[in-house]
Each structure stands twice: as structure tokens, then as C-alpha cells.
Image (cartoon, grey):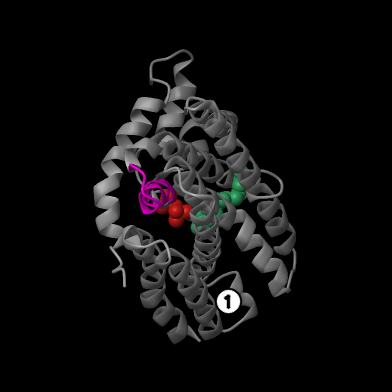
Amino acid sequence: MTQPISFDKTSERFSGLITSALRRNLPPRGAYPPEIHEAMRYACLDGGKRFRPVLVLAACEAVGGDPKQALLPACAVELIHAYSLVHDDLPALDNDELRRGKPSCHKQFGEALAILTGDALLTHAFQLLSRVRPAAKAVQLMSELSYAAGSQGMIGGQVADIQFARGGNDVAVLDYISQHKTGRLIQASAVLGAVMGTGSQAQIQKIRRYGQAVGFAFQVVDDIMDADGYLRLMDPEEARRKAASLIQKAKHEAETLGKKSGPLLGLADFLLERMVPNYAAVDSKN
Ligand code: GRG
């Protein structure tokens, strides 16, 4: 049986590579007009767990590829993630003043520039994917990622979330929100990695199912940590069981990939571990 390799270990191995690739592949700070390039770099370059790009590299490795070959797609998913955070923090959405321990992008640069920063990060992600060779692979990656980020993916989930916040009480709608708003980008991260690793169709399908379960679990765990979302509709124990069962499903899929799946198992376990201390805190409040 393959042993999990902890997220911390995998992140230690990959984070430096990811940050250098982001630095290299973002437009330089001084490029004209400098304000937008400074804001783009501000939104991406420090902070964040880098869960999604680490997942891209781990999935590439799990199917037998060289993770360094997957750095462009890893940057692309992190840019889309950063864009979603910049836009989500805007006054019209969550109105958050802080992000990753510093002023959110609109607090630092103003609302107009923050809107444009999100737009530029989203667009630049696809510019990076267009550089992948062979070109047929680039098209496959762009198709996968644009679908995951669009109105039938992350944006669809966000729209459903806005409606749910007006008084929704249906777990099925909450499941849709988690799977789309948060889940699709995480799932696409795993699939992009497997495609870059030239995985077989069977391997890519396994990674797709793994990514679906991990992406879904990510949001359930986030709700447990925030005492929000699912905890409005179910008790903490039920939400914890839901997350644990998704994580188990993800690990089952990853295990069938064989001996290089240790980091994918560790990424799934990381979610379980995040939930434990906060779950205890939530439980004691009830
Ligand atoms: C507004 C375009 C737009 C999309 C909205 C993904 C999303 C949809 C909004 C982001 C805000 C949010 C709370 C999403 C839920 C997923 C989540 C918990 C994101 C935070 O991801 P982490 O924990 O963040 O990986 P770091 O900072 O570690 O990268």
C-alpha cells in the first residue's frame, strides 16, 4: 500500500519552483503601465498555501511525468485562483479588507484597478497555457480550465452562492455551490497535471474523480472551519462525516495510481487534518 506523503513535505519540494515560475511568468513590475503589473504581482506573489499549483505538480508526477514540465499550467491555475480572490474581496461581493494577511487588492490599489487586476490575471492564465507544446496539449488544457472557471464552473457556483445567501436551505444547492465555486478549479488543477504528465485516459479519469472529491471536500472543510455554509444546515458531526467520506473516496482513487500517488494521498489527508482542531472548537460552541 502506498504511504501518504504530507502536504507540508510536498509543498516544501514544490513551492520554491512555483514561486519562481510565477515571478518569471508574470509581466515585469516596471512594464507599462506599471500600476497593473505591480497589482498583479501583489495579488499572487506572497502568501497562500499554493494548494492548487502543488496539486498540478503532484498529479503530473502521479501519472509518471516530470513535475517541472507542469509549471506553466500550475501558474495558470494559481493566477485564476488569485483573480477569484481579488474579485471576491471587492465591495460588491464579500467586501473583505484583508487577504493573505495584508490589505486586499482594492484596499491597496483602489476598486477600479482591482477589477482590472482580476481581469488581467484571468487573461494572463490563458496566455501562459498557449505557450505549452505540443499545441494540441495547450488546446486541451485551455478547454479544461476555461470550462472549470466559467459559468458552468466556478462562476456558476459563485452565482448560486449569492442566491443561496438570500435564504437558501437546500443541501443539494449547497453541494452544487461547493462542487462548482471551489471544486471545479481544484479538479481542473489535478486534470491539468495529469495531462501534462501524459497520463493514459484511464489515469486521467482516476485523477478527475480524485480531483472532484478533493475539490468538494475542500469547501466542506472550509465551512467547518468557518462555522458557516453546511453548518447552517447540519450539525458539525454530519458535516465532518461528509468531508471525511469525500476524502476517503479521493484517497481510494489516488491509491489505484500506484507508488507515485503518495503526495496526492497527503494532499487529501491535509484537508482532514485542517478540519480536526477547528471541528473541536465548533463542537464546543454547540
Ligand atoms: C468572484 C470570480 C469570482 C469567483 C468567486 C472561488 C471564488 C468564487 C471566490 C473566492 C473566495 C472563496 C472564499 C472561495 C472558496 C474557496 C476558498 C476556501 C478559497 C480560499 O482558498 P485557499 O484556502 O487560499 O487555498 P490561499 O490563500 O491559501 O491560496
User: Residue 57 versus residue 91: which sits nearer the camera?
Assistant: 57
Task: Count neighbours of disc 1 (C-alpha within 10 A) and say few if under 14, some if 14 to 19, many if 20 or more.
Answer: some
Question: For residue 65, what is the image quadrant?
Answer: top left
Q: Is residue 84 visible?
A: yes
Question: For residue 138, what is the image quadrant?
Answer: top right
**Magenta stretch: helix, strand or loop mostly:** helix
Percent across and percent down for residue 273 are 36, 71
Percent across and percent down for residue 126 are 55, 30
Q: Residue at x 46, y 37 (%)?
A: 73
Percent across and percent down for residue 154 are 63, 50
Kind of residue at badge 1: Leu
Q: Is residue 184 left or right of residue 39?
A: right
Q: Secondary structure at mark 1?
A: helix
- Number of callouts: 1
Is residue 242 located in the magenta-colored stretch of the structure?
no
Residue 137 position (above or below residue 85): above
Q: Is residue 261 left or right of residue 141?
A: left
Q: Which residues are magenta?
A: 52-66
Percent across and percent down for residue 260 are 32, 57
Assign the N terminus to one quadrant of the image: bottom left
Q: Residue at x 49, y 79 (%)?
A: 240
Residue 194 position (above or below residue 220): above
Of all residues shown, which one is farthest toward the top?
32
Q: Which residue is mark 1?
A: 231
Q: Is residue 82 left or right of residue 154?
A: left
